[in-house]
Amino acid sequence: MEMRRALANQPAAAQHAAADHQWWQAYWKKRSRSPIDEFASLAWYHRYMLGPGGALEEWNGLAEAAVKDVPQRMRDHFSLMSWWDPVGLLDRPVSSAQTAEACSALGQA
């Protein structure tokens, strides 16, 4: 735990992590065949790790579309809810306005 925290707080480590997230986001996005499949979920996770704001906006759009479609695509909506699991949003205290906004969006969904 201490080693992970020390590495995460080094500027070079943050740059490497960002580059890794960008590579993986592009990789999973290429493999995705729909906006909400497993690969889209993995690409979204890496997008969230790079910038939560844009990722939250994308997720909100997908979730809203699933509910507003006629007939509603509730299976897709529930699948989208699981996208938050790897983020660990509910595993730690709310520490930023973006985290609070994400918690609110998840609660509303």
Image: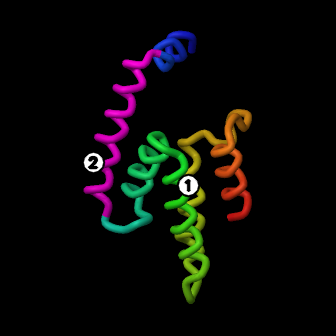
Q: Residue at x 73, y 34 (%)?
A: 93
Quadrant in the picture for residue 21: top left
Give the residue at mark 2.
27
Measuring from the top left, give residue 51's x and y in whole percent.
48, 44
User: What's the residue at 38%, 33% (across, down)?
Assistant: 18
Q: Is residue 64 left or right of residue 19?
A: right
Q: Is residue 23 one of those drawn in magenta?
A: yes
Q: Residue at left 67%, top 56%?
A: 106
Q: Please provide percent x and percent y for residue 45.
A: 46, 47
Q: Give the amino acid at mark 2.
A: Tyr
Q: Where is residue 67? Give x, y as percent.
A: 61, 77
| Residue at image location 50% in from the left, 53% down from the top | 55
Q: Secondary structure at mark 1?
A: helix
As rendered, which of 102 and 29 lies closer to the eye?
102
From the viewer's perspective, is the residue at label 1 or at label 2 nearer?
1
What residue is pinned by disc 1?
56
Q: Using residue 85 as the reference point, say whether residue 48 is left or right of it.
A: left
When the figure is inspected, residue 104 is found, relative to residue 8, above or below; the finding is: below
Q: Which residues are magenta?
A: 10-32
